[in-house]
Image (cartoon, rainbow, N blue to C red):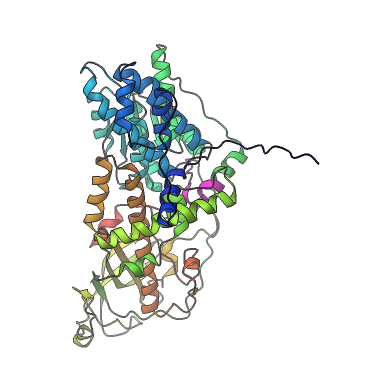
Amino acid sequence: MSECPTIQKCVYDPLAALMEYYASQKGIKKEKQERTGTVEERLKNRIIDGDRVGLHKDLDEGLKSYSALDVINKILLSGMKVVGELFGSGQMQLPFVLQSAEVMKAAVAYLEQFMDKAESTSKGTMVIATVKGDVHDIGKNLVDIILTNNGYRVVNLGIKCPVETMLHAVEEHSADALGMSGLLVKSTLIMKENLEVMNERSITIPVVLGGAALTRRYVEQDLRGVYGGYVSYANDAFDGLKFMEELAGAKARGETLVKTGEQSLPRLQEDEENEQIGFEAKIALSVKAQPQVIIKKIQPAQFIPTSPFWGTKVVDDISLDEVFQYINEVALFRGQWQVRKGKISVEEYQKLLEEKIYPEYESQKSKVKNKKLLQPKVVYGYFPCNSDGDDLIIYSSDVILNPAKRDEESPKTRGAEILRPPRRTQNDNFSLHEKLRFSFPRQSKDRNLCLSDFFAPVDSGKVDVVAFHMVTMGKVASEHSRQLFTSNNYKEYLYFHGLSVEATEALAELWHKKIREELNIHQKDSPEIKKLFSQQYQGSRYSFGYPACPSLEDHVKLFE
């Protein structure tokens, strides 16, 4: 039998440089090969590969044949276009996209000295912001990075931005488009309100919307109907780039983007989106009335847990090693770092994780510990309560401080207001005074429940207990993340920001477990930490801004 030649598919390998690094760590010496080809090919491939070593030398050679502006527009941007195509086809992961963006940024910064002030590399301007009440900014900042390094100017207004601030910036900077981002479900309603305000003022600037709580169906079927201008949905940063490319193309032709009617997407497409992103992270809100559902009452609990204390404690001596045990690696790698399988094989994806992502993960954990970049702290406490319909009443009790309990206070806690637990019947000789109450919405389907249903009713003759906790990784983390972003250290920004977000979530998960232990309801906890992420325990943990408790204003009550 004759020997057949092997047919190989040429696929870009984003791991090349980093695999080379780890190979050297294992004692295998690999020499850096000098780039070959024309200067155009070398510069383009530097962008694609994220390689800035020797960049200035190649740029100087390119300037012998091209103006600085042409080097950017005709060579470097073509490299960024390939990066976008590789990302879109699943052949390049986000960290390597940002590495390419870093090289692009460095190249443009070097070329600016050879450009006249009148020359401009901007193909258009976008004002972008996270909407009022929402503090999540990673998605917005990724759009900023991708647009900025593809020839566009971005005016980034930051987080918790009112619509008035956005519109003022649009006018001040003569923006071509407005981008609104948000992660919380409440943010989708804020976006709708913003579009309605703009419509009332006859403002028709093209708008692009993005964020985890949005779906294409919600944007195209519901939000387009309330705005007279063009509205587009961006699932990721490159969708934002595509939007601006369409806008720039129409502008060059002397045209405007035309608003289209409501679109009906195939069911299959939305199912695919839910499978890829995660159903809980893609919540489509509907403006249509929901059918009435009969309320099915919850059976009263057989016993009410005994609170270990009443009031609050501050805990500020928490081991990062313990917190790291509760990090959800799937959420970190696929969600925050966006290292997803895409179209590569299972074997290739596993190799990527083992040879690049896990070493990076360990490196990041070591770095934040050594430099004290993450400083975990918790405020938590227990409060007497009762339900009253859809409301949860929080009491302030006039019971006295318990000196014995205070003496037993852990050295890791401070500022605790430790009180004797109130007795369990309303005939007991003490009084409860309503301090405040939370109102929760009911489910529009299923059992038509709300959170207050899980606590003893006010007319039950029993006083229940509710636990609250707030966690933080400290100001240093926020400042360091901001410094990485503003210094154009994009890949490191993605890694650190993602780790800090998931470490905060891990701290919340860890402390929820400690609360269950203190309430003595931890017997049903799974012994495997990973299974706790799928709520294999008694109880639930909720955050304001999500469907069960959507009111962000309730944070004020919580802080009280």
Q: Residue at coordinates 33% horizontally, 37% vertically from top-left? A: 53
Task: Check the image and report above or below for 186 versus 412.
Answer: above
Q: Residue at coordinates 54% horizontally, 47% vertically from top-left? A: 341
Whether residue 288 is visible: yes
- Verify whether residue 258 appears in magenta: no
Task: Check the image and report above or below for 285 versus 551.
Answer: above
Whether residue 144 is visible: no
- Residue that protrudes farthest toward the right in the picture: 1
Percent position of residue 402, x then y: 21, 84
Residues 486 and 404: in front is 486
Percent position of residue 496, x then y: 33, 52
Q: Which residues are magenta?
A: 275-294
- Where is the N terminus found, in terms of image quarters? top right
Percent position of residue 488, x then y: 28, 39
Residues 289 and 150: in front is 150
Q: Residue at coordinates 40% horizontally, 55% vertically from top-left? A: 25
Question: Quadrant of residue 311 in the image?
Answer: bottom left
Question: Quadrant of residue 370 in the image?
Answer: bottom left
- Verify whether residue 284 appears in magenta: yes
How many marks can you see? 0
- Residue that protrudes farthest toward the bottom in the picture: 404
Percent position of residue 119, x then y: 25, 17
Task: Check the image and report above or below for 106 versus 532.
Answer: above
